[in-house]
């Protein structure tokens, strides 16, 4: 465990992550108290205040409630009221609240979302607070802290990091005679689909008991799919397709905050068409079914043998899987195994009436004390090494081998950053219907993606 911890620290610090992030000026009508200013006043007023804090991950709610309880015990004048809602409702409510003046004081933010908020001046620049309190951002693994900074401004302190792996149904593997070693060493390529395609075919079973390698397999009456993904993936595909597309050498963008996307690259087009073709073959659960059931929910009920998902979902499988499961390595493509690397942070809404108190909560939520608490819950990998150690111990105590996630994070050149750019909401609005049309079999990737890419890149002109 100690050797692994040192390896995580060294390799992540050597460059798993690069830097990024966003800025902007505050709207004229926002309360002036939320402007950190040149000399931030970080000390709370001492008056009784309530900080509304929002997050979307139900699995993390108990961990952050424990952090909030400890924070409130040390700061009896500050009440932290936590609200959790699902991903879609969460962002709709955040955006509506910012316009209506009812947004939460502090909320968990995402790299795909915060640049737009920052550009519109809807987030507090916390760099003056960081400077005033002498917060040491070097405690965060790798350069996670830099992801939340841009042009001298900062909009969050890192809380966690994540990678992608393959979740497997042990009963399904046993029934098909597939070993974990085969799965861990599966290869993939655009031309043939490699051993990985053969595995998902073998693990797909129709209502008559035929698997996908049989000429009698009926793709219209599938009882168990070889692979389930979470949807079409819009323009990011973090858990859905990014981990395959990236093995070809393709990247969404060439650098953080780029003004050009690469959705017209033949390697990307080929990867997405591979998904659509295998949905038609009955080896990957169709998007219509995923949209109805939910990817992880469908997997947890036994409708699939394999499922691609992120390390933040480990607890969900522990709580909801109806069969023995485990985590396997991603397939190896032409350029090895690749996983998107992401991390969350809390941001302060510029309209908060209590910026000093909100900052104190943000600072604590990203502290070592809270990281250790979150780690003990075993739901995510915290952004500080001590929290990672706690998380590993918590998973080990449950008999869970999570090395598929951690080995991916420490593998040289095994990760690539979430594509942080401006115009995220407009990009999603363009890419979501384009990707869905392909995976629904309504259009070919080669016809749709170059057009969509042109529309995306026009956003930056």
Image (cartoon, rainbow, N blue to C red):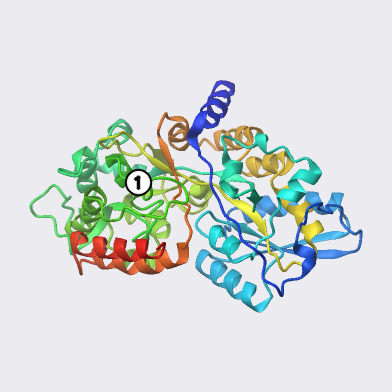
- Residue at the spot 31% in from the left edge and 33% down from the top edge: 336
- Quadrant containing the C terminus in the rendered view: bottom left
Is residue 143 left or right of 451 when viewed as pictured? right
Q: Position of residue 100 (x, y in %)?
A: 65, 78
Q: Residue furthest left?
A: 215
Q: Residue furthest bottom?
A: 100
Looking at the picture, tell me which residue is in the foreground, 293 or 159. Answer: 159
- Quadrant containing the N terminus in the rendered view: top right
Bin the neighbour count of mark 1 within 10 Å (Cα to Cα): few under 14, some 14-19, many 20 and up. Answer: many
Looking at the picture, tell me which residue is in the foreground, 405 or 446. Answer: 446
Question: Label 1: which residue?
Answer: 251
Q: Residue furthest front?
A: 461
Q: Position of residue 93 (x, y in %)?
A: 59, 72
Q: Residue furthest right?
A: 46
Let me know if residue 378 appears in the view: no
- Residue at the spot 21% in from the left edge and 41% down from the top edge: 189
């Amino acid at each position: 465990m100690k050797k692994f911890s040192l390896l995580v620290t060294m390799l992540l610090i050597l460059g798993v992550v690069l830097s990024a992030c966003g800025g902007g000026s505050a709207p004229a009508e926002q309360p002036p108290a939320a402007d950190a200013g040149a000399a931030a006043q970080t000390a709370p007023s001492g008056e009784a205040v309530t900080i509304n804090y929002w997050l979307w991950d139900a699995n993390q709610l108990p961990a952050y409630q424990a952090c909030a309880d400890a924070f409130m015990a040390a700061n009896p004048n500050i009440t932290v009221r936590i609200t959790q809602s699902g991903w879609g409702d969460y962002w709709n409510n955040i955006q509506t609240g910012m316009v209506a003046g009812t947004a939460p004081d502090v909320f968990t933010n995402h790299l795909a979302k915060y640049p737009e908020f920052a550009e519109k001046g809807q987030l507090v620049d916390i760099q003056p607070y960081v400077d005033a309190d002498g917060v040491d951002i070097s405690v965060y693994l790798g350069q996670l802290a830099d992801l939340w900074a841009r042009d001298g401004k900062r909009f969050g302190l890192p809380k966690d990091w994540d990678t992608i792996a393959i979740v497997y149904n042990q009963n399904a593997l046993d029934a098909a005679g597939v070993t974990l070693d085969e799965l861990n060493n599966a290869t993939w390529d655009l031309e043939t689909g490699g051993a990985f395609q053969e595995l998902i075919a073998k693990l797909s079973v129709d209502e008559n008991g035929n698997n996908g390698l049989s000429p009698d397999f009926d793709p219209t009456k599938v009882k168990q799919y070889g692979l389930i993904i979470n949807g079409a993936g819009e323009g990011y595909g973090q858990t859905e397709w990014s981990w395959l597309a990236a093995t070809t050498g393709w990247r969404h963008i060439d650098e953080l905050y780029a003004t050009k996307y690469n959705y017209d690259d033949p390697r990307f087009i080929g990867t997405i068409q591979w998904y659509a073709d295998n949905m038609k073959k009955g080896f990957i659960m169709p998007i219509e079914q995923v949209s109805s059931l939910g990817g992880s929910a469908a997997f947890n009920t036994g409708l699939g043998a394999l499922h691609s998902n992120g390390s933040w979902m480990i607890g969900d499988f522990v709580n909801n899987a109806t069969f023995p499961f485990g985590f396997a390595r991603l397939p190896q493509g032409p350029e090895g195994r690749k996983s998107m690397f992401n991390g969350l942070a809390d941001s302060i809404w510029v309209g908060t009436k209590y910026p000093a108190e909100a900052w104190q909560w943000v600072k604590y939520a990203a502290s070592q004390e809270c990281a250790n608490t979150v780690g003990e819950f075993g739901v995510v990998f915290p952004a500080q090494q001590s929290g990672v150690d706690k998380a590993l111990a918590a998973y080990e105590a449950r008999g869970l081998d999570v090395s598929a996630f951690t080995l991916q994070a420490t593998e040289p050149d095994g990760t690539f950053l979430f594509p942080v750019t401006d115009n995220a909401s407009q990009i999603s609005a363009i890419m979501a219907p384009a990707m869905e049309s392909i995976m629904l079999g309504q259009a070919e990737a080669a016809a749709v993606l170059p057009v969509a890419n042109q529309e995306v890149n026009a956003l930056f002109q």
